[in-house]
Image (cartoon, rainbow, N blue to C red):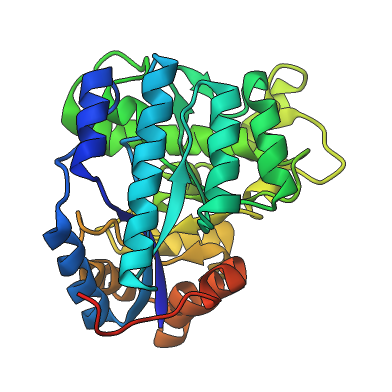
Amino acid sequence: MCIDVHTHHLPAAYMDMLHEGGGPTFGAAHDESVLHKMIDGQEEVGIRCQIISTGPNSPYLRDRAQAVAAARTVNDAYKAVVDRYEGRFAAFGSAPLPHADAAAAEAVRCLDELQFVGMHFGCSALGHALDSPAFADMWTELDRREAIIYIHPGGILCGTEPGLSGMDDAGIAVTIGSAAELATAALRMAALCRTHRRLRVIIGLLGGSLPFLLGRVVWLGERFKGRSLLAAESPNGSLIAELRRFSYDTNLLPDPKVIGFAREAYGLDRLLFGSDAPGMAPQVTARFMRDGGLTEDEFAEISVHNPGRLFGQRLADQPLDQTTH
């Protein structure tokens, strides 16, 4: 049965804390009935497990104490969901960036104590790029644990990051801004992973605009030697090679042609099924993927085999209770 790597759960208590702290909020809080509807969608598509994350609603608050409290609140709530539904859901933990030492401590708690399958990060954190030197100790801890890292847009999307003039329009921010955020974060993470080789990175929404720009990255990178990470030399191969080590979830639809671009850009073995539930029903995502020309064998590769190889025992050890809800 397939694994859905891109789903969200927004507990009410957590969203209240983000509002109070002036943090990023996008969408309404979820009650228990939303989880029940997600399970109904799992059964219709044949999903074994959905991995929940906060999506654009990361615990990125300027006040350190508020950020730490929010991160712990949502992570504890996720642990309760994972335990209560016994295999229906797994979780990506959240860290209270940009407070680097606190973020490192909470990431360690998520992986070592709460036993989450990985960590979720926005594309940036209150103006700080993910490869900021200030976050070096956190990435070292995550690299040591061979952590799976899931990247989702949130800065421009939620109006918490400086952006191009015009990004204050909500529709433009969602459709254009988030795609640019993802491509930028992917390039930054590729540079970071040159020295943190054990991190395993998933870029959300097929990398945003990235699959359409890989040729341009190569072409212009040569012109920026010494002035851009695009042209930085590395013994581990080109930046494009690093990008093709990452995985990418399938939620940059509904245009079915996009899946073909992504397959050509990254390779079929780099794609993972991601629906964006409850915002988009997984059966809708599955239909768009098939409309994009995927065979049933290719669909199985993306939804079953690729995530199985990536997550391994992290998900295989979880029981599946077909009756809980």
Task: Answer with left or right where residue 287 lies relative to residue 161.
Answer: left
Task: Answer with left or right where residue 96 lies relative to residue 285.
Answer: right
Task: Answer with left or right where residue 311 lies relative to residue 125.
Answer: right
- Please state, as top left, top right, bottom left or bottom right, where the C terminus lies in the image: bottom left
- Please state, as top left, top right, bottom left or bottom right, where the N terminus lies in the image: bottom left
Q: Position of residue 192 (x, y in %)?
A: 69, 35
Q: Position of residue 62 (x, y in %)?
A: 39, 14
In this view, 224 is above or below 285: above
Query: Which one is in front, 148 or 30?
Result: 30
Residue at the image point whose x is 26% and y is 75% from the top: 42
Instruction: Farthest residue to the right: give it.
Output: 235
Residue at the image point whose x is 75% and y is 43% from the top: 238
Q: Position of residue 309 (x, y in %)?
A: 61, 73
Residue at the image point whose x is 19% and y is 54% from the top: 279
Query: Which one is in front, 133 or 251?
Result: 133
Q: Position of residue 290 (x, y in %)?
A: 32, 76
Task: Answer with left or right where residue 53 lies relative to residue 36.
Answer: right
